[in-house]
């Protein structure tokens, strides 16, 4: 019998609705090498690496009458050219044109009759650059048996820029296993039901859209999802971020320098993550004011912030999986506070309460896990967010440290990487950011109707960071 989806993975299929597609994405921008980089290059690279992520040649097969959770089966008609696609912007392609393309691609759900991922090569960017956009369903990425495909196409390139992978991966001779018949799937479900009769009832409830049952699977699968029960027990403050959302999206980006965050950290004795959340707080404050919203001294925006954690027995290594060790912390961002220093101290104090157990994973450790871990860790953060009650937080902010050295795809140097975190029902904005090779790159995914000014919010990131830098004595 083919491997069955875990209760957690299946829950992401059941949670998906037309307005909330459950895929996570990334936009990576590359410098085209002198040797060239075209669509055929990308297809060949994926063919060489896909054996490292076997799940990407498998599709979901549902069991008749939902008697059991779906199974992963090999896609006998797998066609890499269907999943790896090409697009182009009118030269010279601008950031605005790229983000509009990203928004349209992310608005469309994945084809659930095929493996649940897509990758796009985008040509025509100004400066001879190219972009690779990835979309991966959250049911696929568990950090153990499957990681994000955006992680495996990147290398520490050889000095000649060849991008040769240390593992020596090659295009394999793949023979799909025979897909089971409906009779076989039902028989397998009946056999399991004899041993675990309660699972039949659970699966029918989940497949029928029982939100309470589905959320329970997500919470149970991800372990400790939040701390500070006193904060989480209170309903999130009302903001324009929490409205009924549509099926369409807007996307915006912001670029900043990591050194600026380090300077603020050193001056105020906090962490880079504290500085990031303070920058987000300042940007949200100024955005709310630009909209004419009522902002008082006590105004807050509650963020759900997934962080990688480890248990006492976990030993950091570069060998493998990042697993499901993601804890989600609830943080009230002090958008009503006009002083950037006081905002920073509020955030730092709140995060210190969460991380005082010492289980949070440092940036240096994260950068060593499984190569370029940010794509996978953003996916795990989005999975954590999906299981939380949307009544207790206003938006998701995922912050994943990446390596501070350049990475390559088939010799093309990656310049920037912007995450695309999916929206939850009733939430109009999700923010993801990744630090990489000296930069900190923000991706703002917003509902097209409710966040028509998402580019304004993205533009306020620099202003908020400058406010904090203004509190640092010149070196």
Image (cartoon, grey):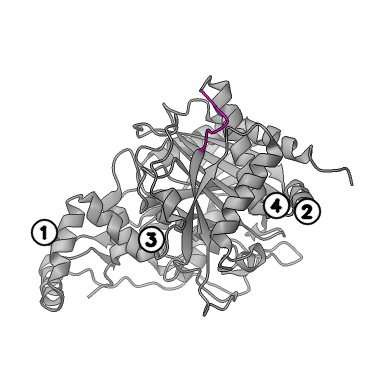
* Disc number lying in front (4 or 1): 1
Give residue 363's quadrant in the image: bottom right
Q: Disc 2 versus disc 3: distance between alpha carbons?
A: 39 Å
Where is mark 4, residue-wise?
A: 33
Q: Position of residue 375 (x, y in %)?
A: 53, 56
Q: Position of residue 461 (x, y in %)?
A: 65, 36
Q: Disc 3 versus disc 4: distance between alpha carbons?
A: 32 Å
Q: Position of residue 360 (x, y in %)?
A: 57, 65
Q: Name the one closer to the observer, 5 or 291.
A: 291
* Disc number lying in front (2 or 3): 2
Q: Name the one closer to the observer, 94 or 438.
A: 438
Vertical comparison of 371 with 278: above or below: below
Q: Disc 1 versus disc 3: distance between alpha carbons?
A: 23 Å
Q: Disc 4 versus disc 1: distance between alpha carbons?
A: 52 Å
Of the two numbered discs 2 and 3 on the same chain, state the one appearing first in sequence: 3
* Disc number lying in front (3 or 4): 3
Where is mark 1, residue-wise?
A: 65
Q: Secondary structure at mark 2?
A: helix
Q: Residue at x 75, y 47 (%)?
A: 264
Range covered by the magenta-colored residues: 294-300
Q: Residue at x 56, y 58 (%)?
A: 353
């Amino acid at each position: 019998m083919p491997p069955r989806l875990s209760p957690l993975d299946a829950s992401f299929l059941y949670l998906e609705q037309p307005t909330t597609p459950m895929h996570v994405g990334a936009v990576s921008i590359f410098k085209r090498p002198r040797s060239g980089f075209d669509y055929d290059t990308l297809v060949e690279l994926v063919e060489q690496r896909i054996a490292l992520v076997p799940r990407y040649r498998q599709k979901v097969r549902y069991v008749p009458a939902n008697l059991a959770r779906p199974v992963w089966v090999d896609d006998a008609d797998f066609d890499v050219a269907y999943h790896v696609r090409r697009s182009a912007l009118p030269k010279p392609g601008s950031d605005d044109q790229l983000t509009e393309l990203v928004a349209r691609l992310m608005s469309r759900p994945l084809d659930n009759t095929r493996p649940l991922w897509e990758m796009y090569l985008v040509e025509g960017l100004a400066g001879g650059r190219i972009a690779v956009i990835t979309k991966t369903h959250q049911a696929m990425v568990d950090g153990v048996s499957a990681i994000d495909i955006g992680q495996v196409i990147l290398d520490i390139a050889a000095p000649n820029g060849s991008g040769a992978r240390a593992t020596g991966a090659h295009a394999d001779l793949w023979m799909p296993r025979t897909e089971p018949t409906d009779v076989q799937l039902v028989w397998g479900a009946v056999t399991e039901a004899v041993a675990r009769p309660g699972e039949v009832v659970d699966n029918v409830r989940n497949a029928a859209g029982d939100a309470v049952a589905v959320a329970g699977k997500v919470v149970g699968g991800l372990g400790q999802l939040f701390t500070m029960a006193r904060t989480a027990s209170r309903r999130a403050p009302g903001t324009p971020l929490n409205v009924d959302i549509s099926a369409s999206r807007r996307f915006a980006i912001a670029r900043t320098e990591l050194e600026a965050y380090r300077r603020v950290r050193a001056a105020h004795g906090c962490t880079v993550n504290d500085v990031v959340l303070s920058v987000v707080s300042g940007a949200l404050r100024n955005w709310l004011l630009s909209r004419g919203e009522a902002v008082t001294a006590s105004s807050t925006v509650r963020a759900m912030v997934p962080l990688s954690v480890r248990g006492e027995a976990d030993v950091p290594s570069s060998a493998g999986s990042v697993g499901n060790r993601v804890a989600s912390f609830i943080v009230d961002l002090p958008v009503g506070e006009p002083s950037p220093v006081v905002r920073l101290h509020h955030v730092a104090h709140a995060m210190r309460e969460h991380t005082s157990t010492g289980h949070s994973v440092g940036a240096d450790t994260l950068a060593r896990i499984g190569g370029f871990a940010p794509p996978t860790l953003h996916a795990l953060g989005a999975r954590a967010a999906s299981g939380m009650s949307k009544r207790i937080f206003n938006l998701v902010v995922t912050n994943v440290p990446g390596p501070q050295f350049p990475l390559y795809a088939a010799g093309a140097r990656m310049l920037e990487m912007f995450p695309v975190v999916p929206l939850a029902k009733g939430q109009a904005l999700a923010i993801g950011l990744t630090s990489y090779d000296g930069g900190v790159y923000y991706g703002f995914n917003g509902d097209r109707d409710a966040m028509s000014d998402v580019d304004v919010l993205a533009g306020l990131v620099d202003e908020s960071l400058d406010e904090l830098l203004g509190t640092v004595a010149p070196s």
